[in-house]
Amino acid sequence: MPSEMYFNLESIPATVDEVVVSGLDRTHDSIVKKQFVGLVESQNLRDLFENVKVAKEKLVKLGVFKTIFAVVDVSEDHSKPNAYKITFKVEEKRFVTARMSMTHGTDGITKACGNVRLNNFAHNAECADIDVEIGSNQMVSKFATISKPLENNPYVRFSIGGTEGNWDHYWAKFLRHERSVFTEAQAESPVGLHRFQWDAVWRETEVKDPTAPLGVLKECGPAVKSSLRHVFESDARPDLVFPDAGYLCRISQEIASITPGSQTGQSNVSDISSSDTGSLVDRALQLKLEGLLQKPFRLCDWLVGEVTFSSGLIHSFTKHPVHISDRFFLGGPLELRGFQWRTVSPSEPLLAPTVQMLDSYETTLNNNNQQSLSAPVSTHSPLSPIGADAFWLTGAHLYTPLPYWGAEEGSLASQLRLHGFFLAGSTLERPIQN
């Protein structure tokens, strides 16, 4: 019986004599060669295998290959006994790919979604995306984005694009229409993913029906929002659907300038700046912070627990009221269960206007006279949410497979879980007093 032999891979010298990539068609050689800098510097067999893995991950991150296989073989030059030949066999994605899907959201709206992507259109791992969403509520959204790696680094990607869409905030009785342009730099680090974004948004809101609360009526109209945003995300979960270890941490910070800062009424003189022409510009400056933490853990073979916490805060530095489009709402089957969609927030009573009253309200709004705004409200009028300046939400969850059927590997029942939960949360109207 042969005796077992063990080798220390770090003690076995190894060098890379040749790197071959087969299957390239539209992709330039220069961007592919950049991914092998660490591979050709391998000094021993352990380094070689690890660097092959890293090089393969970089090729995957480029996003232009459908399949990638790596083969390690001895060099064809027998005069170099410690030299190896590395072959990557790749298959490029099609130039044009498309997909369509149908989704039904927890807000009760069904959407038809379509995406068309141009892969590697300039031969350096660029891609262009066009997305269209059509909802059952007749709302249409369109997105267009072009992105490419910066300095041929697959872990740093730059994007530029624009959006146009209509959104129905039926729970708060208003409609929102937006057009925007944005730029984004995305960078991966050892601790997580960073996204730095600038965007400029032209936004217009209007009431959905005449019974909208007075607070919603006062905030209708056009505005321009320019913002800087940083999002950090660290995801160490082994599975995105049913994780049993790791964690998810997401932190977002946004500072935004909105013009005009107030749709009706006049701000304090100190809150209004002068433009180059000498005219007064009503501009709001606000900070928005959001955080999310999820920690799953396995209690036993058949039981997984998870604790979650999320919170958010928005504050105006210029003492302007925060627009309803930027405020927080809670409630829904995937959030604060037991409450209707986005109904947990400060509320105002609905109006019951007549035709003559609507005409007087429109005249008052056009004159920007906030002090004289008034409306008849019944003492028994139903309430409508208007959003909050802050929120917090925490929860504890237990997941277990279905009894009898859930233990069968690969079956449909194995993809289902029994879910027990405890949730607590609240919204805060003015957590920071001016």
Image (cartoon, helix red, strand yellow):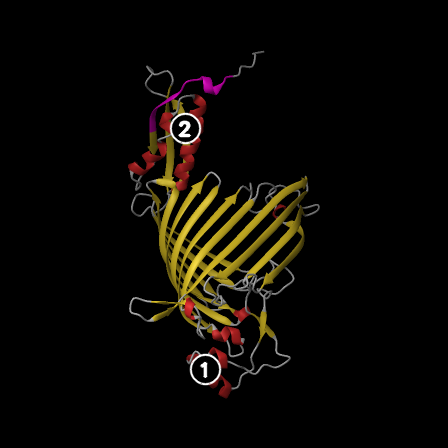
Residue drawn at x 59%, y 57% as measured from the top left = 392
Crowd around label 1: few <14 · some 14–19 · many ≥20 (10 Å): some
- Horizontal side of residue 328 vs 262, given as left or right: right
- Which mark, residue 71? 2
Picture coordinates of residue 146 (x, y %)? Answer: 35, 52
Q: Secondary structure at mark 2?
A: strand
Using the image, determine if residue 401 lies above or below residue 427.
Answer: above
**Magenta segment, which residues?**
7-19
Q: Tell me if label 2 and label 1 are in contact, CB under 8 Å.
A: no
- Pointer 1 residue: 364
Q: CA distance from mark 2 to mark 1?
A: 75 Å
- Which mark, residue 169? none
Residue drawn at x 49%, y 40% as measured from the top left = 191
Picture coordinates of residue 103 (x, y %)? Answer: 51, 58
- Horizontal side of residue 4 vs 17, given as left or right: right
- Horizontal side of residue 110 vs 298, given as left or right: left
Can see residue 32? yes
Residue type of the residue flagged with mark 2: Val
Q: Nearer the viewer, residue 410 or 336?
A: 336
